[in-house]
Image (tube, rainbow, N blue to C red):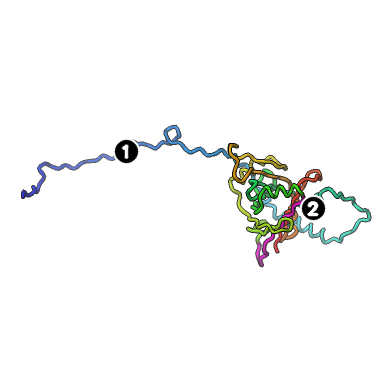
């Protein structure tokens, strides 16, 4: 068997490689016109809702108001000699509460899905409270069209707990005295903010918000809403009530919300 030569029959020369400058590498496309296209997302309205005014700088004024109100409550109640006529067909206690704060409340959701409740300082502000109730939107709006609806939200009172009543995460839900499940506080989603942005110029009313291109109706029904002014009355740190205000005292839908810690 022939043995391989110890040295190659031809001289070996090292191959010299010249480094390639960065400018010679092909650059990725940086614009859609150069070949790369971005997927188109559905057009959404720009969110222009402002922060609530009561988030900062109002604690001092609230303390002064509470002290003044406590002083007036300590006065004896004097029954007047003349009787004030009361309408039997108007709003009972909804025409004005001493110390109440006017808020904007919106019930919205798909007809067959759970209804959401948003409380705002004004139609153009971000929600200060957003609850999801285990009641179908269509059922609640139907009940409100028949008569007065009272929703009571109850939660357990914990010892040495300084949580504000509007910051409680979960509530037991009662509608007209019947237990109907629960209510959960949640942060606004993009869909919630889009609804608030669409209704930013609406002070009160009800209707349907168009979704998508209008070709196909969602499986859970149309996106409906009802907006009205509410009067917020804080009884104590463990109770708070929202009364719907009807314009001109007419016999429109009425809703009362009671937040209670027991």
Query: As drawn, is 208 to the left or to the right of 101?
Result: left
Mark 2 secondary-structure assignment: loop
Indicate whether residue 143 is drawn in magenta.
no
Mark identifier at residue 21: 1
Mark 1 secondary-structure assignment: loop
Judge whether 205 appears above or below 165 on screen: above
Q: Quick one: label 1 or label 2, which is nearer the N terminus?
A: 1
Q: Residue at 94% of width from left, 56% of height from top?
A: 81
Residue 78 in the image: x percent, y percent?
A: 89, 59
Indicate whether residue 156 is drawn in magenta.
yes
Residue 198 in the image: x percent, y percent?
A: 64, 40
Judge whether 158 appears above or below 230 on screen: below
Q: Which residues are magenta?
A: 147-162
Marks 1 and 2 sit apart, C-alpha to C-alpha, by 78 Å
Q: Residue at 74% of width from left, 49% of height from top?
A: 144
Please state which of the two labelled residues, at mark 1 or mark 2, is closer to the viewer. Answer: 2
Judge whether 74 appears above or below 203 on screen: below
Work out whether residue 8 can be spotted. yes
Q: Is the residue marked by circle 2 packed among few (<14), some (14-19), or many (20+) residues within 10 Å? A: few
């Amino acid at each position: 068997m022939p043995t391989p030569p110890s040295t190659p029959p031809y001289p070996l020369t090292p191959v010299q490689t010249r480094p390639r400058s960065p400018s010679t590498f092909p650059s990725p496309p940086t614009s859609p016109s150069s070949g790369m296209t971005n997927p188109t997302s559905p057009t959404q309205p720009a969110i222009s809702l402002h922060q609530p005014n009561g988030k900062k700088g109002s604690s001092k004024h609230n303390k002064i108001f509470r002290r003044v109100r406590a002083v007036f409550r300590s006065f004896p109640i004097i029954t007047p000699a003349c009787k004030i006529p009361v309408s039997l067909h108007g709003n009972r206690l909804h025409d004005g509460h001493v110390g109440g704060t006017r808020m904007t409340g919106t019930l919205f959701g798909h007809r067959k899905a759970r209804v959401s409740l948003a409380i705002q300082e004004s139609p153009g502000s971000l929600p200060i409270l957003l609850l999801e109730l285990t009641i179908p939107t269509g059922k609640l709006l139907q009940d409100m069209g028949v008569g007065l609806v009272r929703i009571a939200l109850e939660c357990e009172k914990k010892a040495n707990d300084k949580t504000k009543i509007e910051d409680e995460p979960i509530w037991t839900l009662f509608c007209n005295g019947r237990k109907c499940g629960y209510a959960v506080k949640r942060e606004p989603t993009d869909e919630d903010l889009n609804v608030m942005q669409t209704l930013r110029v609406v002070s009160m009313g009800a209707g349907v918000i168009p979704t998508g291109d209008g070709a196909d109706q969602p499986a859970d029904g149309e996106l409906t809403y009802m907006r009205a002014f509410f009067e917020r009355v804080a009884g104590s740190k463990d109770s708070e009530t929202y009364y719907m205000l009807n314009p001109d005292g007419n016999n429109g839908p009425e809703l009362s919300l009671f937040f209670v810690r027991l």
